[in-house]
Image: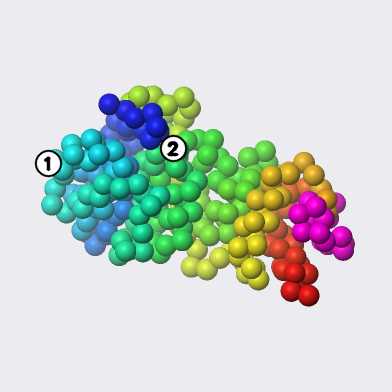
Amino acid sequence: MKRKDLGQHFLIDNNVIQDEIRFANLNINDVVLEIGPGKGALTIPMSKKVKQVIAIEKDKSLYDQLIPIVPNNVKLICADALKVDFSELFNVTKIVSNLPYKISSPITFRLLSNDFEKAILIYQKEFADRMVAKPYTKNYCRLSVGVYYQAFSRILRIVPRTCFSPQPKIESCIVELIPRKKPAFKVKDEQLFFQLTKDLFNHRRKKIKTIIKNKYNIETEIPFSDSRVEMLSPLQIGTICDLISDFQDE
């Protein structure tokens, strides 16, 4: 039975499952992390192509159902993926998952703080559209900037609602994430960069100078001060971040 509180929609379309495996370019040396294996629709076919699958399932009833049906190279962990210490698992080379929709944002950034080659992940389409959005577009947001800073991302294919049971309300997408070897650009204070990005997008209709004055008590003229955040590239947000950092160090 589906648990609504976990945002469960089980993938039932074998063509989509095979596409995920193909996009991941799995091989016998891979150790694959899967979050939310559900009933094992992706877990079992993946296990036939890789060294090991590490599958984290929060739902105890699904975990118990998986134990007798998965092969020996599948390591099952019954836990909340948002609380798992991924650093203890990271001989992981790839991540392939149909992510629970409710944890899409926090789990993505937790994953990107670790080292891996590639992730093939299914998200709701509206989330995926925001993830890959560019400046001057309606979907450009804090998520777009954060993902761009840490990874290369692209939508590989649309997944119709009919590929899941029960059917979600909107379409989904398969997204490829490849972590950058180093951030897209340098900032003096990474924590400040993420906080500034949040502050700017929380007031996206206001001009930059107004937000900087109200949030950081800085009235000195700064670049892009008459712009709004949807007009700024991630690098330009980084430039503003470094100027704020300089003011705070004075």
Q: Residue at x 14, y 40 (%)?
A: 69
Q: Amino acid at mark 2?
A: Tyr
Q: Residue at x 64, y 45 (%)?
A: 141
Residue 237 makes an appearance in the image: yes
Q: Position of residue 178 (x, y in %)?
A: 45, 57
Tags 2 and 1 in contact by the CB under 8 Å rule?
A: no
Q: Nearer the viewer, residue 70 or 128?
A: 70
Q: Position of residue 65 (x, y in %)?
A: 18, 36
Question: In the displayed structure, would residue 169 be above or below residue 194?
Answer: above
Residue 135 percent across, percent down from the top left = 68, 48
Residue 239 in sight from this viewpoint:
no
Dominant secondary structure of the magenta stretch? loop
Of label 2 and label 1, which has the lower sequence position? Answer: 1
Residue linked to disc 2: 101
1 relative to 123 in the view: left or right: left
* Residue 231 counted in the magenta span: no
Q: Residue at x 35, y 47 (%)?
A: 80
Q: Amino acid at mark 1?
A: Pro
Nearer the observer, 52 or 77: 77
Tell me the quarter of the image containing the N terminus: top left
Q: Residues within 10 Å of mark 2 (few under 14, many from 20)?
A: some
Q: CA distance from mark 2 to mark 1?
A: 27 Å
Q: Residues within 10 Å of mark 1 (few under 14, many from 20)?
A: few
Q: Which residue is mark 1?
A: 68
In the rendered structure, which segment of residues is drawn in magenta?
A: 211-227
Quadrant of the image occupied by residue 101? top left
